[in-house]
Image (cartoon, rainbow, N blue to C red):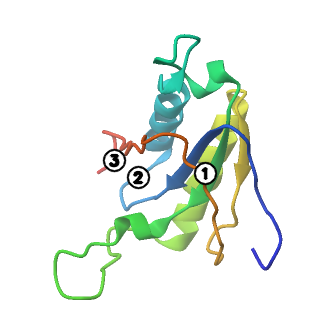
Amino acid sequence: MDGKVTGSIGPGLMILLGVGTGDGEASADWLVEKIRGLRIFPDSDGKMNLSVEQSGGALLVVSQFTLYGDTRRGRRPSFDGAAPPDEANRLYEYFVQRARALGLKVETGVFQAMMSVHLVNEGPVTLICESPLSA
């Protein structure tokens, strides 16, 4: 951001975290546990069998309200499904704190900042995780 690196990791997961209306701490807790336990990293046989924790990877958590951009109508996305900024920031920080409390290495972007995010994606794995606890 503004020419400075605010968060950087080696192997691990880049989490684009969108907070929607109706999300709460229970949703964040569920997502942290889900992400922590996903067996998507290769084991010694090259099979997707290890979690980010088991593989020694880290998380780069970037706030991304545009995940709630609804493009079904018109030509301009509606972001009505995104949580208000104060609540979204609170839950974003809560998510980061919970992940760190579980022993995961976590780096972050800057909430509501214009950032250039660079990703080297190793393999064709991109997943969407949504909490069943969200409204």
The three-letter amino acid code for the residue at tag 1 is Val
- Which residue is the extreme one toward the right? 4
- Which residue is the extreme one toward the bottom? 75
Q: Which residue is mark 2?
A: 23
The three-letter amino acid code for the residue at tag 3 is Ser
At 47% from the left and 38% from the top, the residue drawn is 31
Q: Which residue is mark 1?
A: 120
At 42% from the left and 45% from the top, the residue drawn is 126
- In this rendering, would 72 be left or right of 1? left
The three-letter amino acid code for the residue at tag 2 is Asp
Q: Count residues near mark 2 (Cα–Cα under 10 Å), then give few for <14, some for 14-19, many for 20+.
A: many
Q: Nearer the viewer, mark 1 or mark 2?
A: 1
- In this rendering, would 122 be left or right of 55? left
Q: Count residues near mark 1 (Cα–Cα under 10 Å), then give few for <14, some for 14-19, many for 20+.
A: few
**For the residues marked 1 and 2, what is the alpha-carbon distance in whole angstroms?**
30 Å
**For the residues marked 2 and 3, what is the alpha-carbon distance in whole angstroms?**
5 Å
Q: Quadrant of the N terminus?
A: bottom right
Q: Where residue 134 is drawn, which disc sits there?
A: 3
Give the secondary structure at mark 2. loop
- In this rendering, would 9 be left or right of 16? right
At 70% from the left and 31% from the top, the residue drawn is 104
- Which residue is the extreme one toward the top? 45
Look at the picture and state if 102 lies above or below 5: above
Q: Disc 2 vs disc 3: Cβ atoms closer than 8 Å? A: yes
Q: Nearer the viewer, mark 3 or mark 1?
A: 1
Mark with earlier residue (2, 3):
2
Mark with earlier residue (3, 1):
1
Q: Where residue 32 is drawn, which disc sits there?
A: none
Give the secondary structure at mark 1. loop
Q: Disc 3 vs disc 1: Cβ atoms closer than 8 Å? A: no
Q: Nearer the viewer, residue 134 or 108?
A: 108
Look at the picture and state if 110 lies above or below 40: below
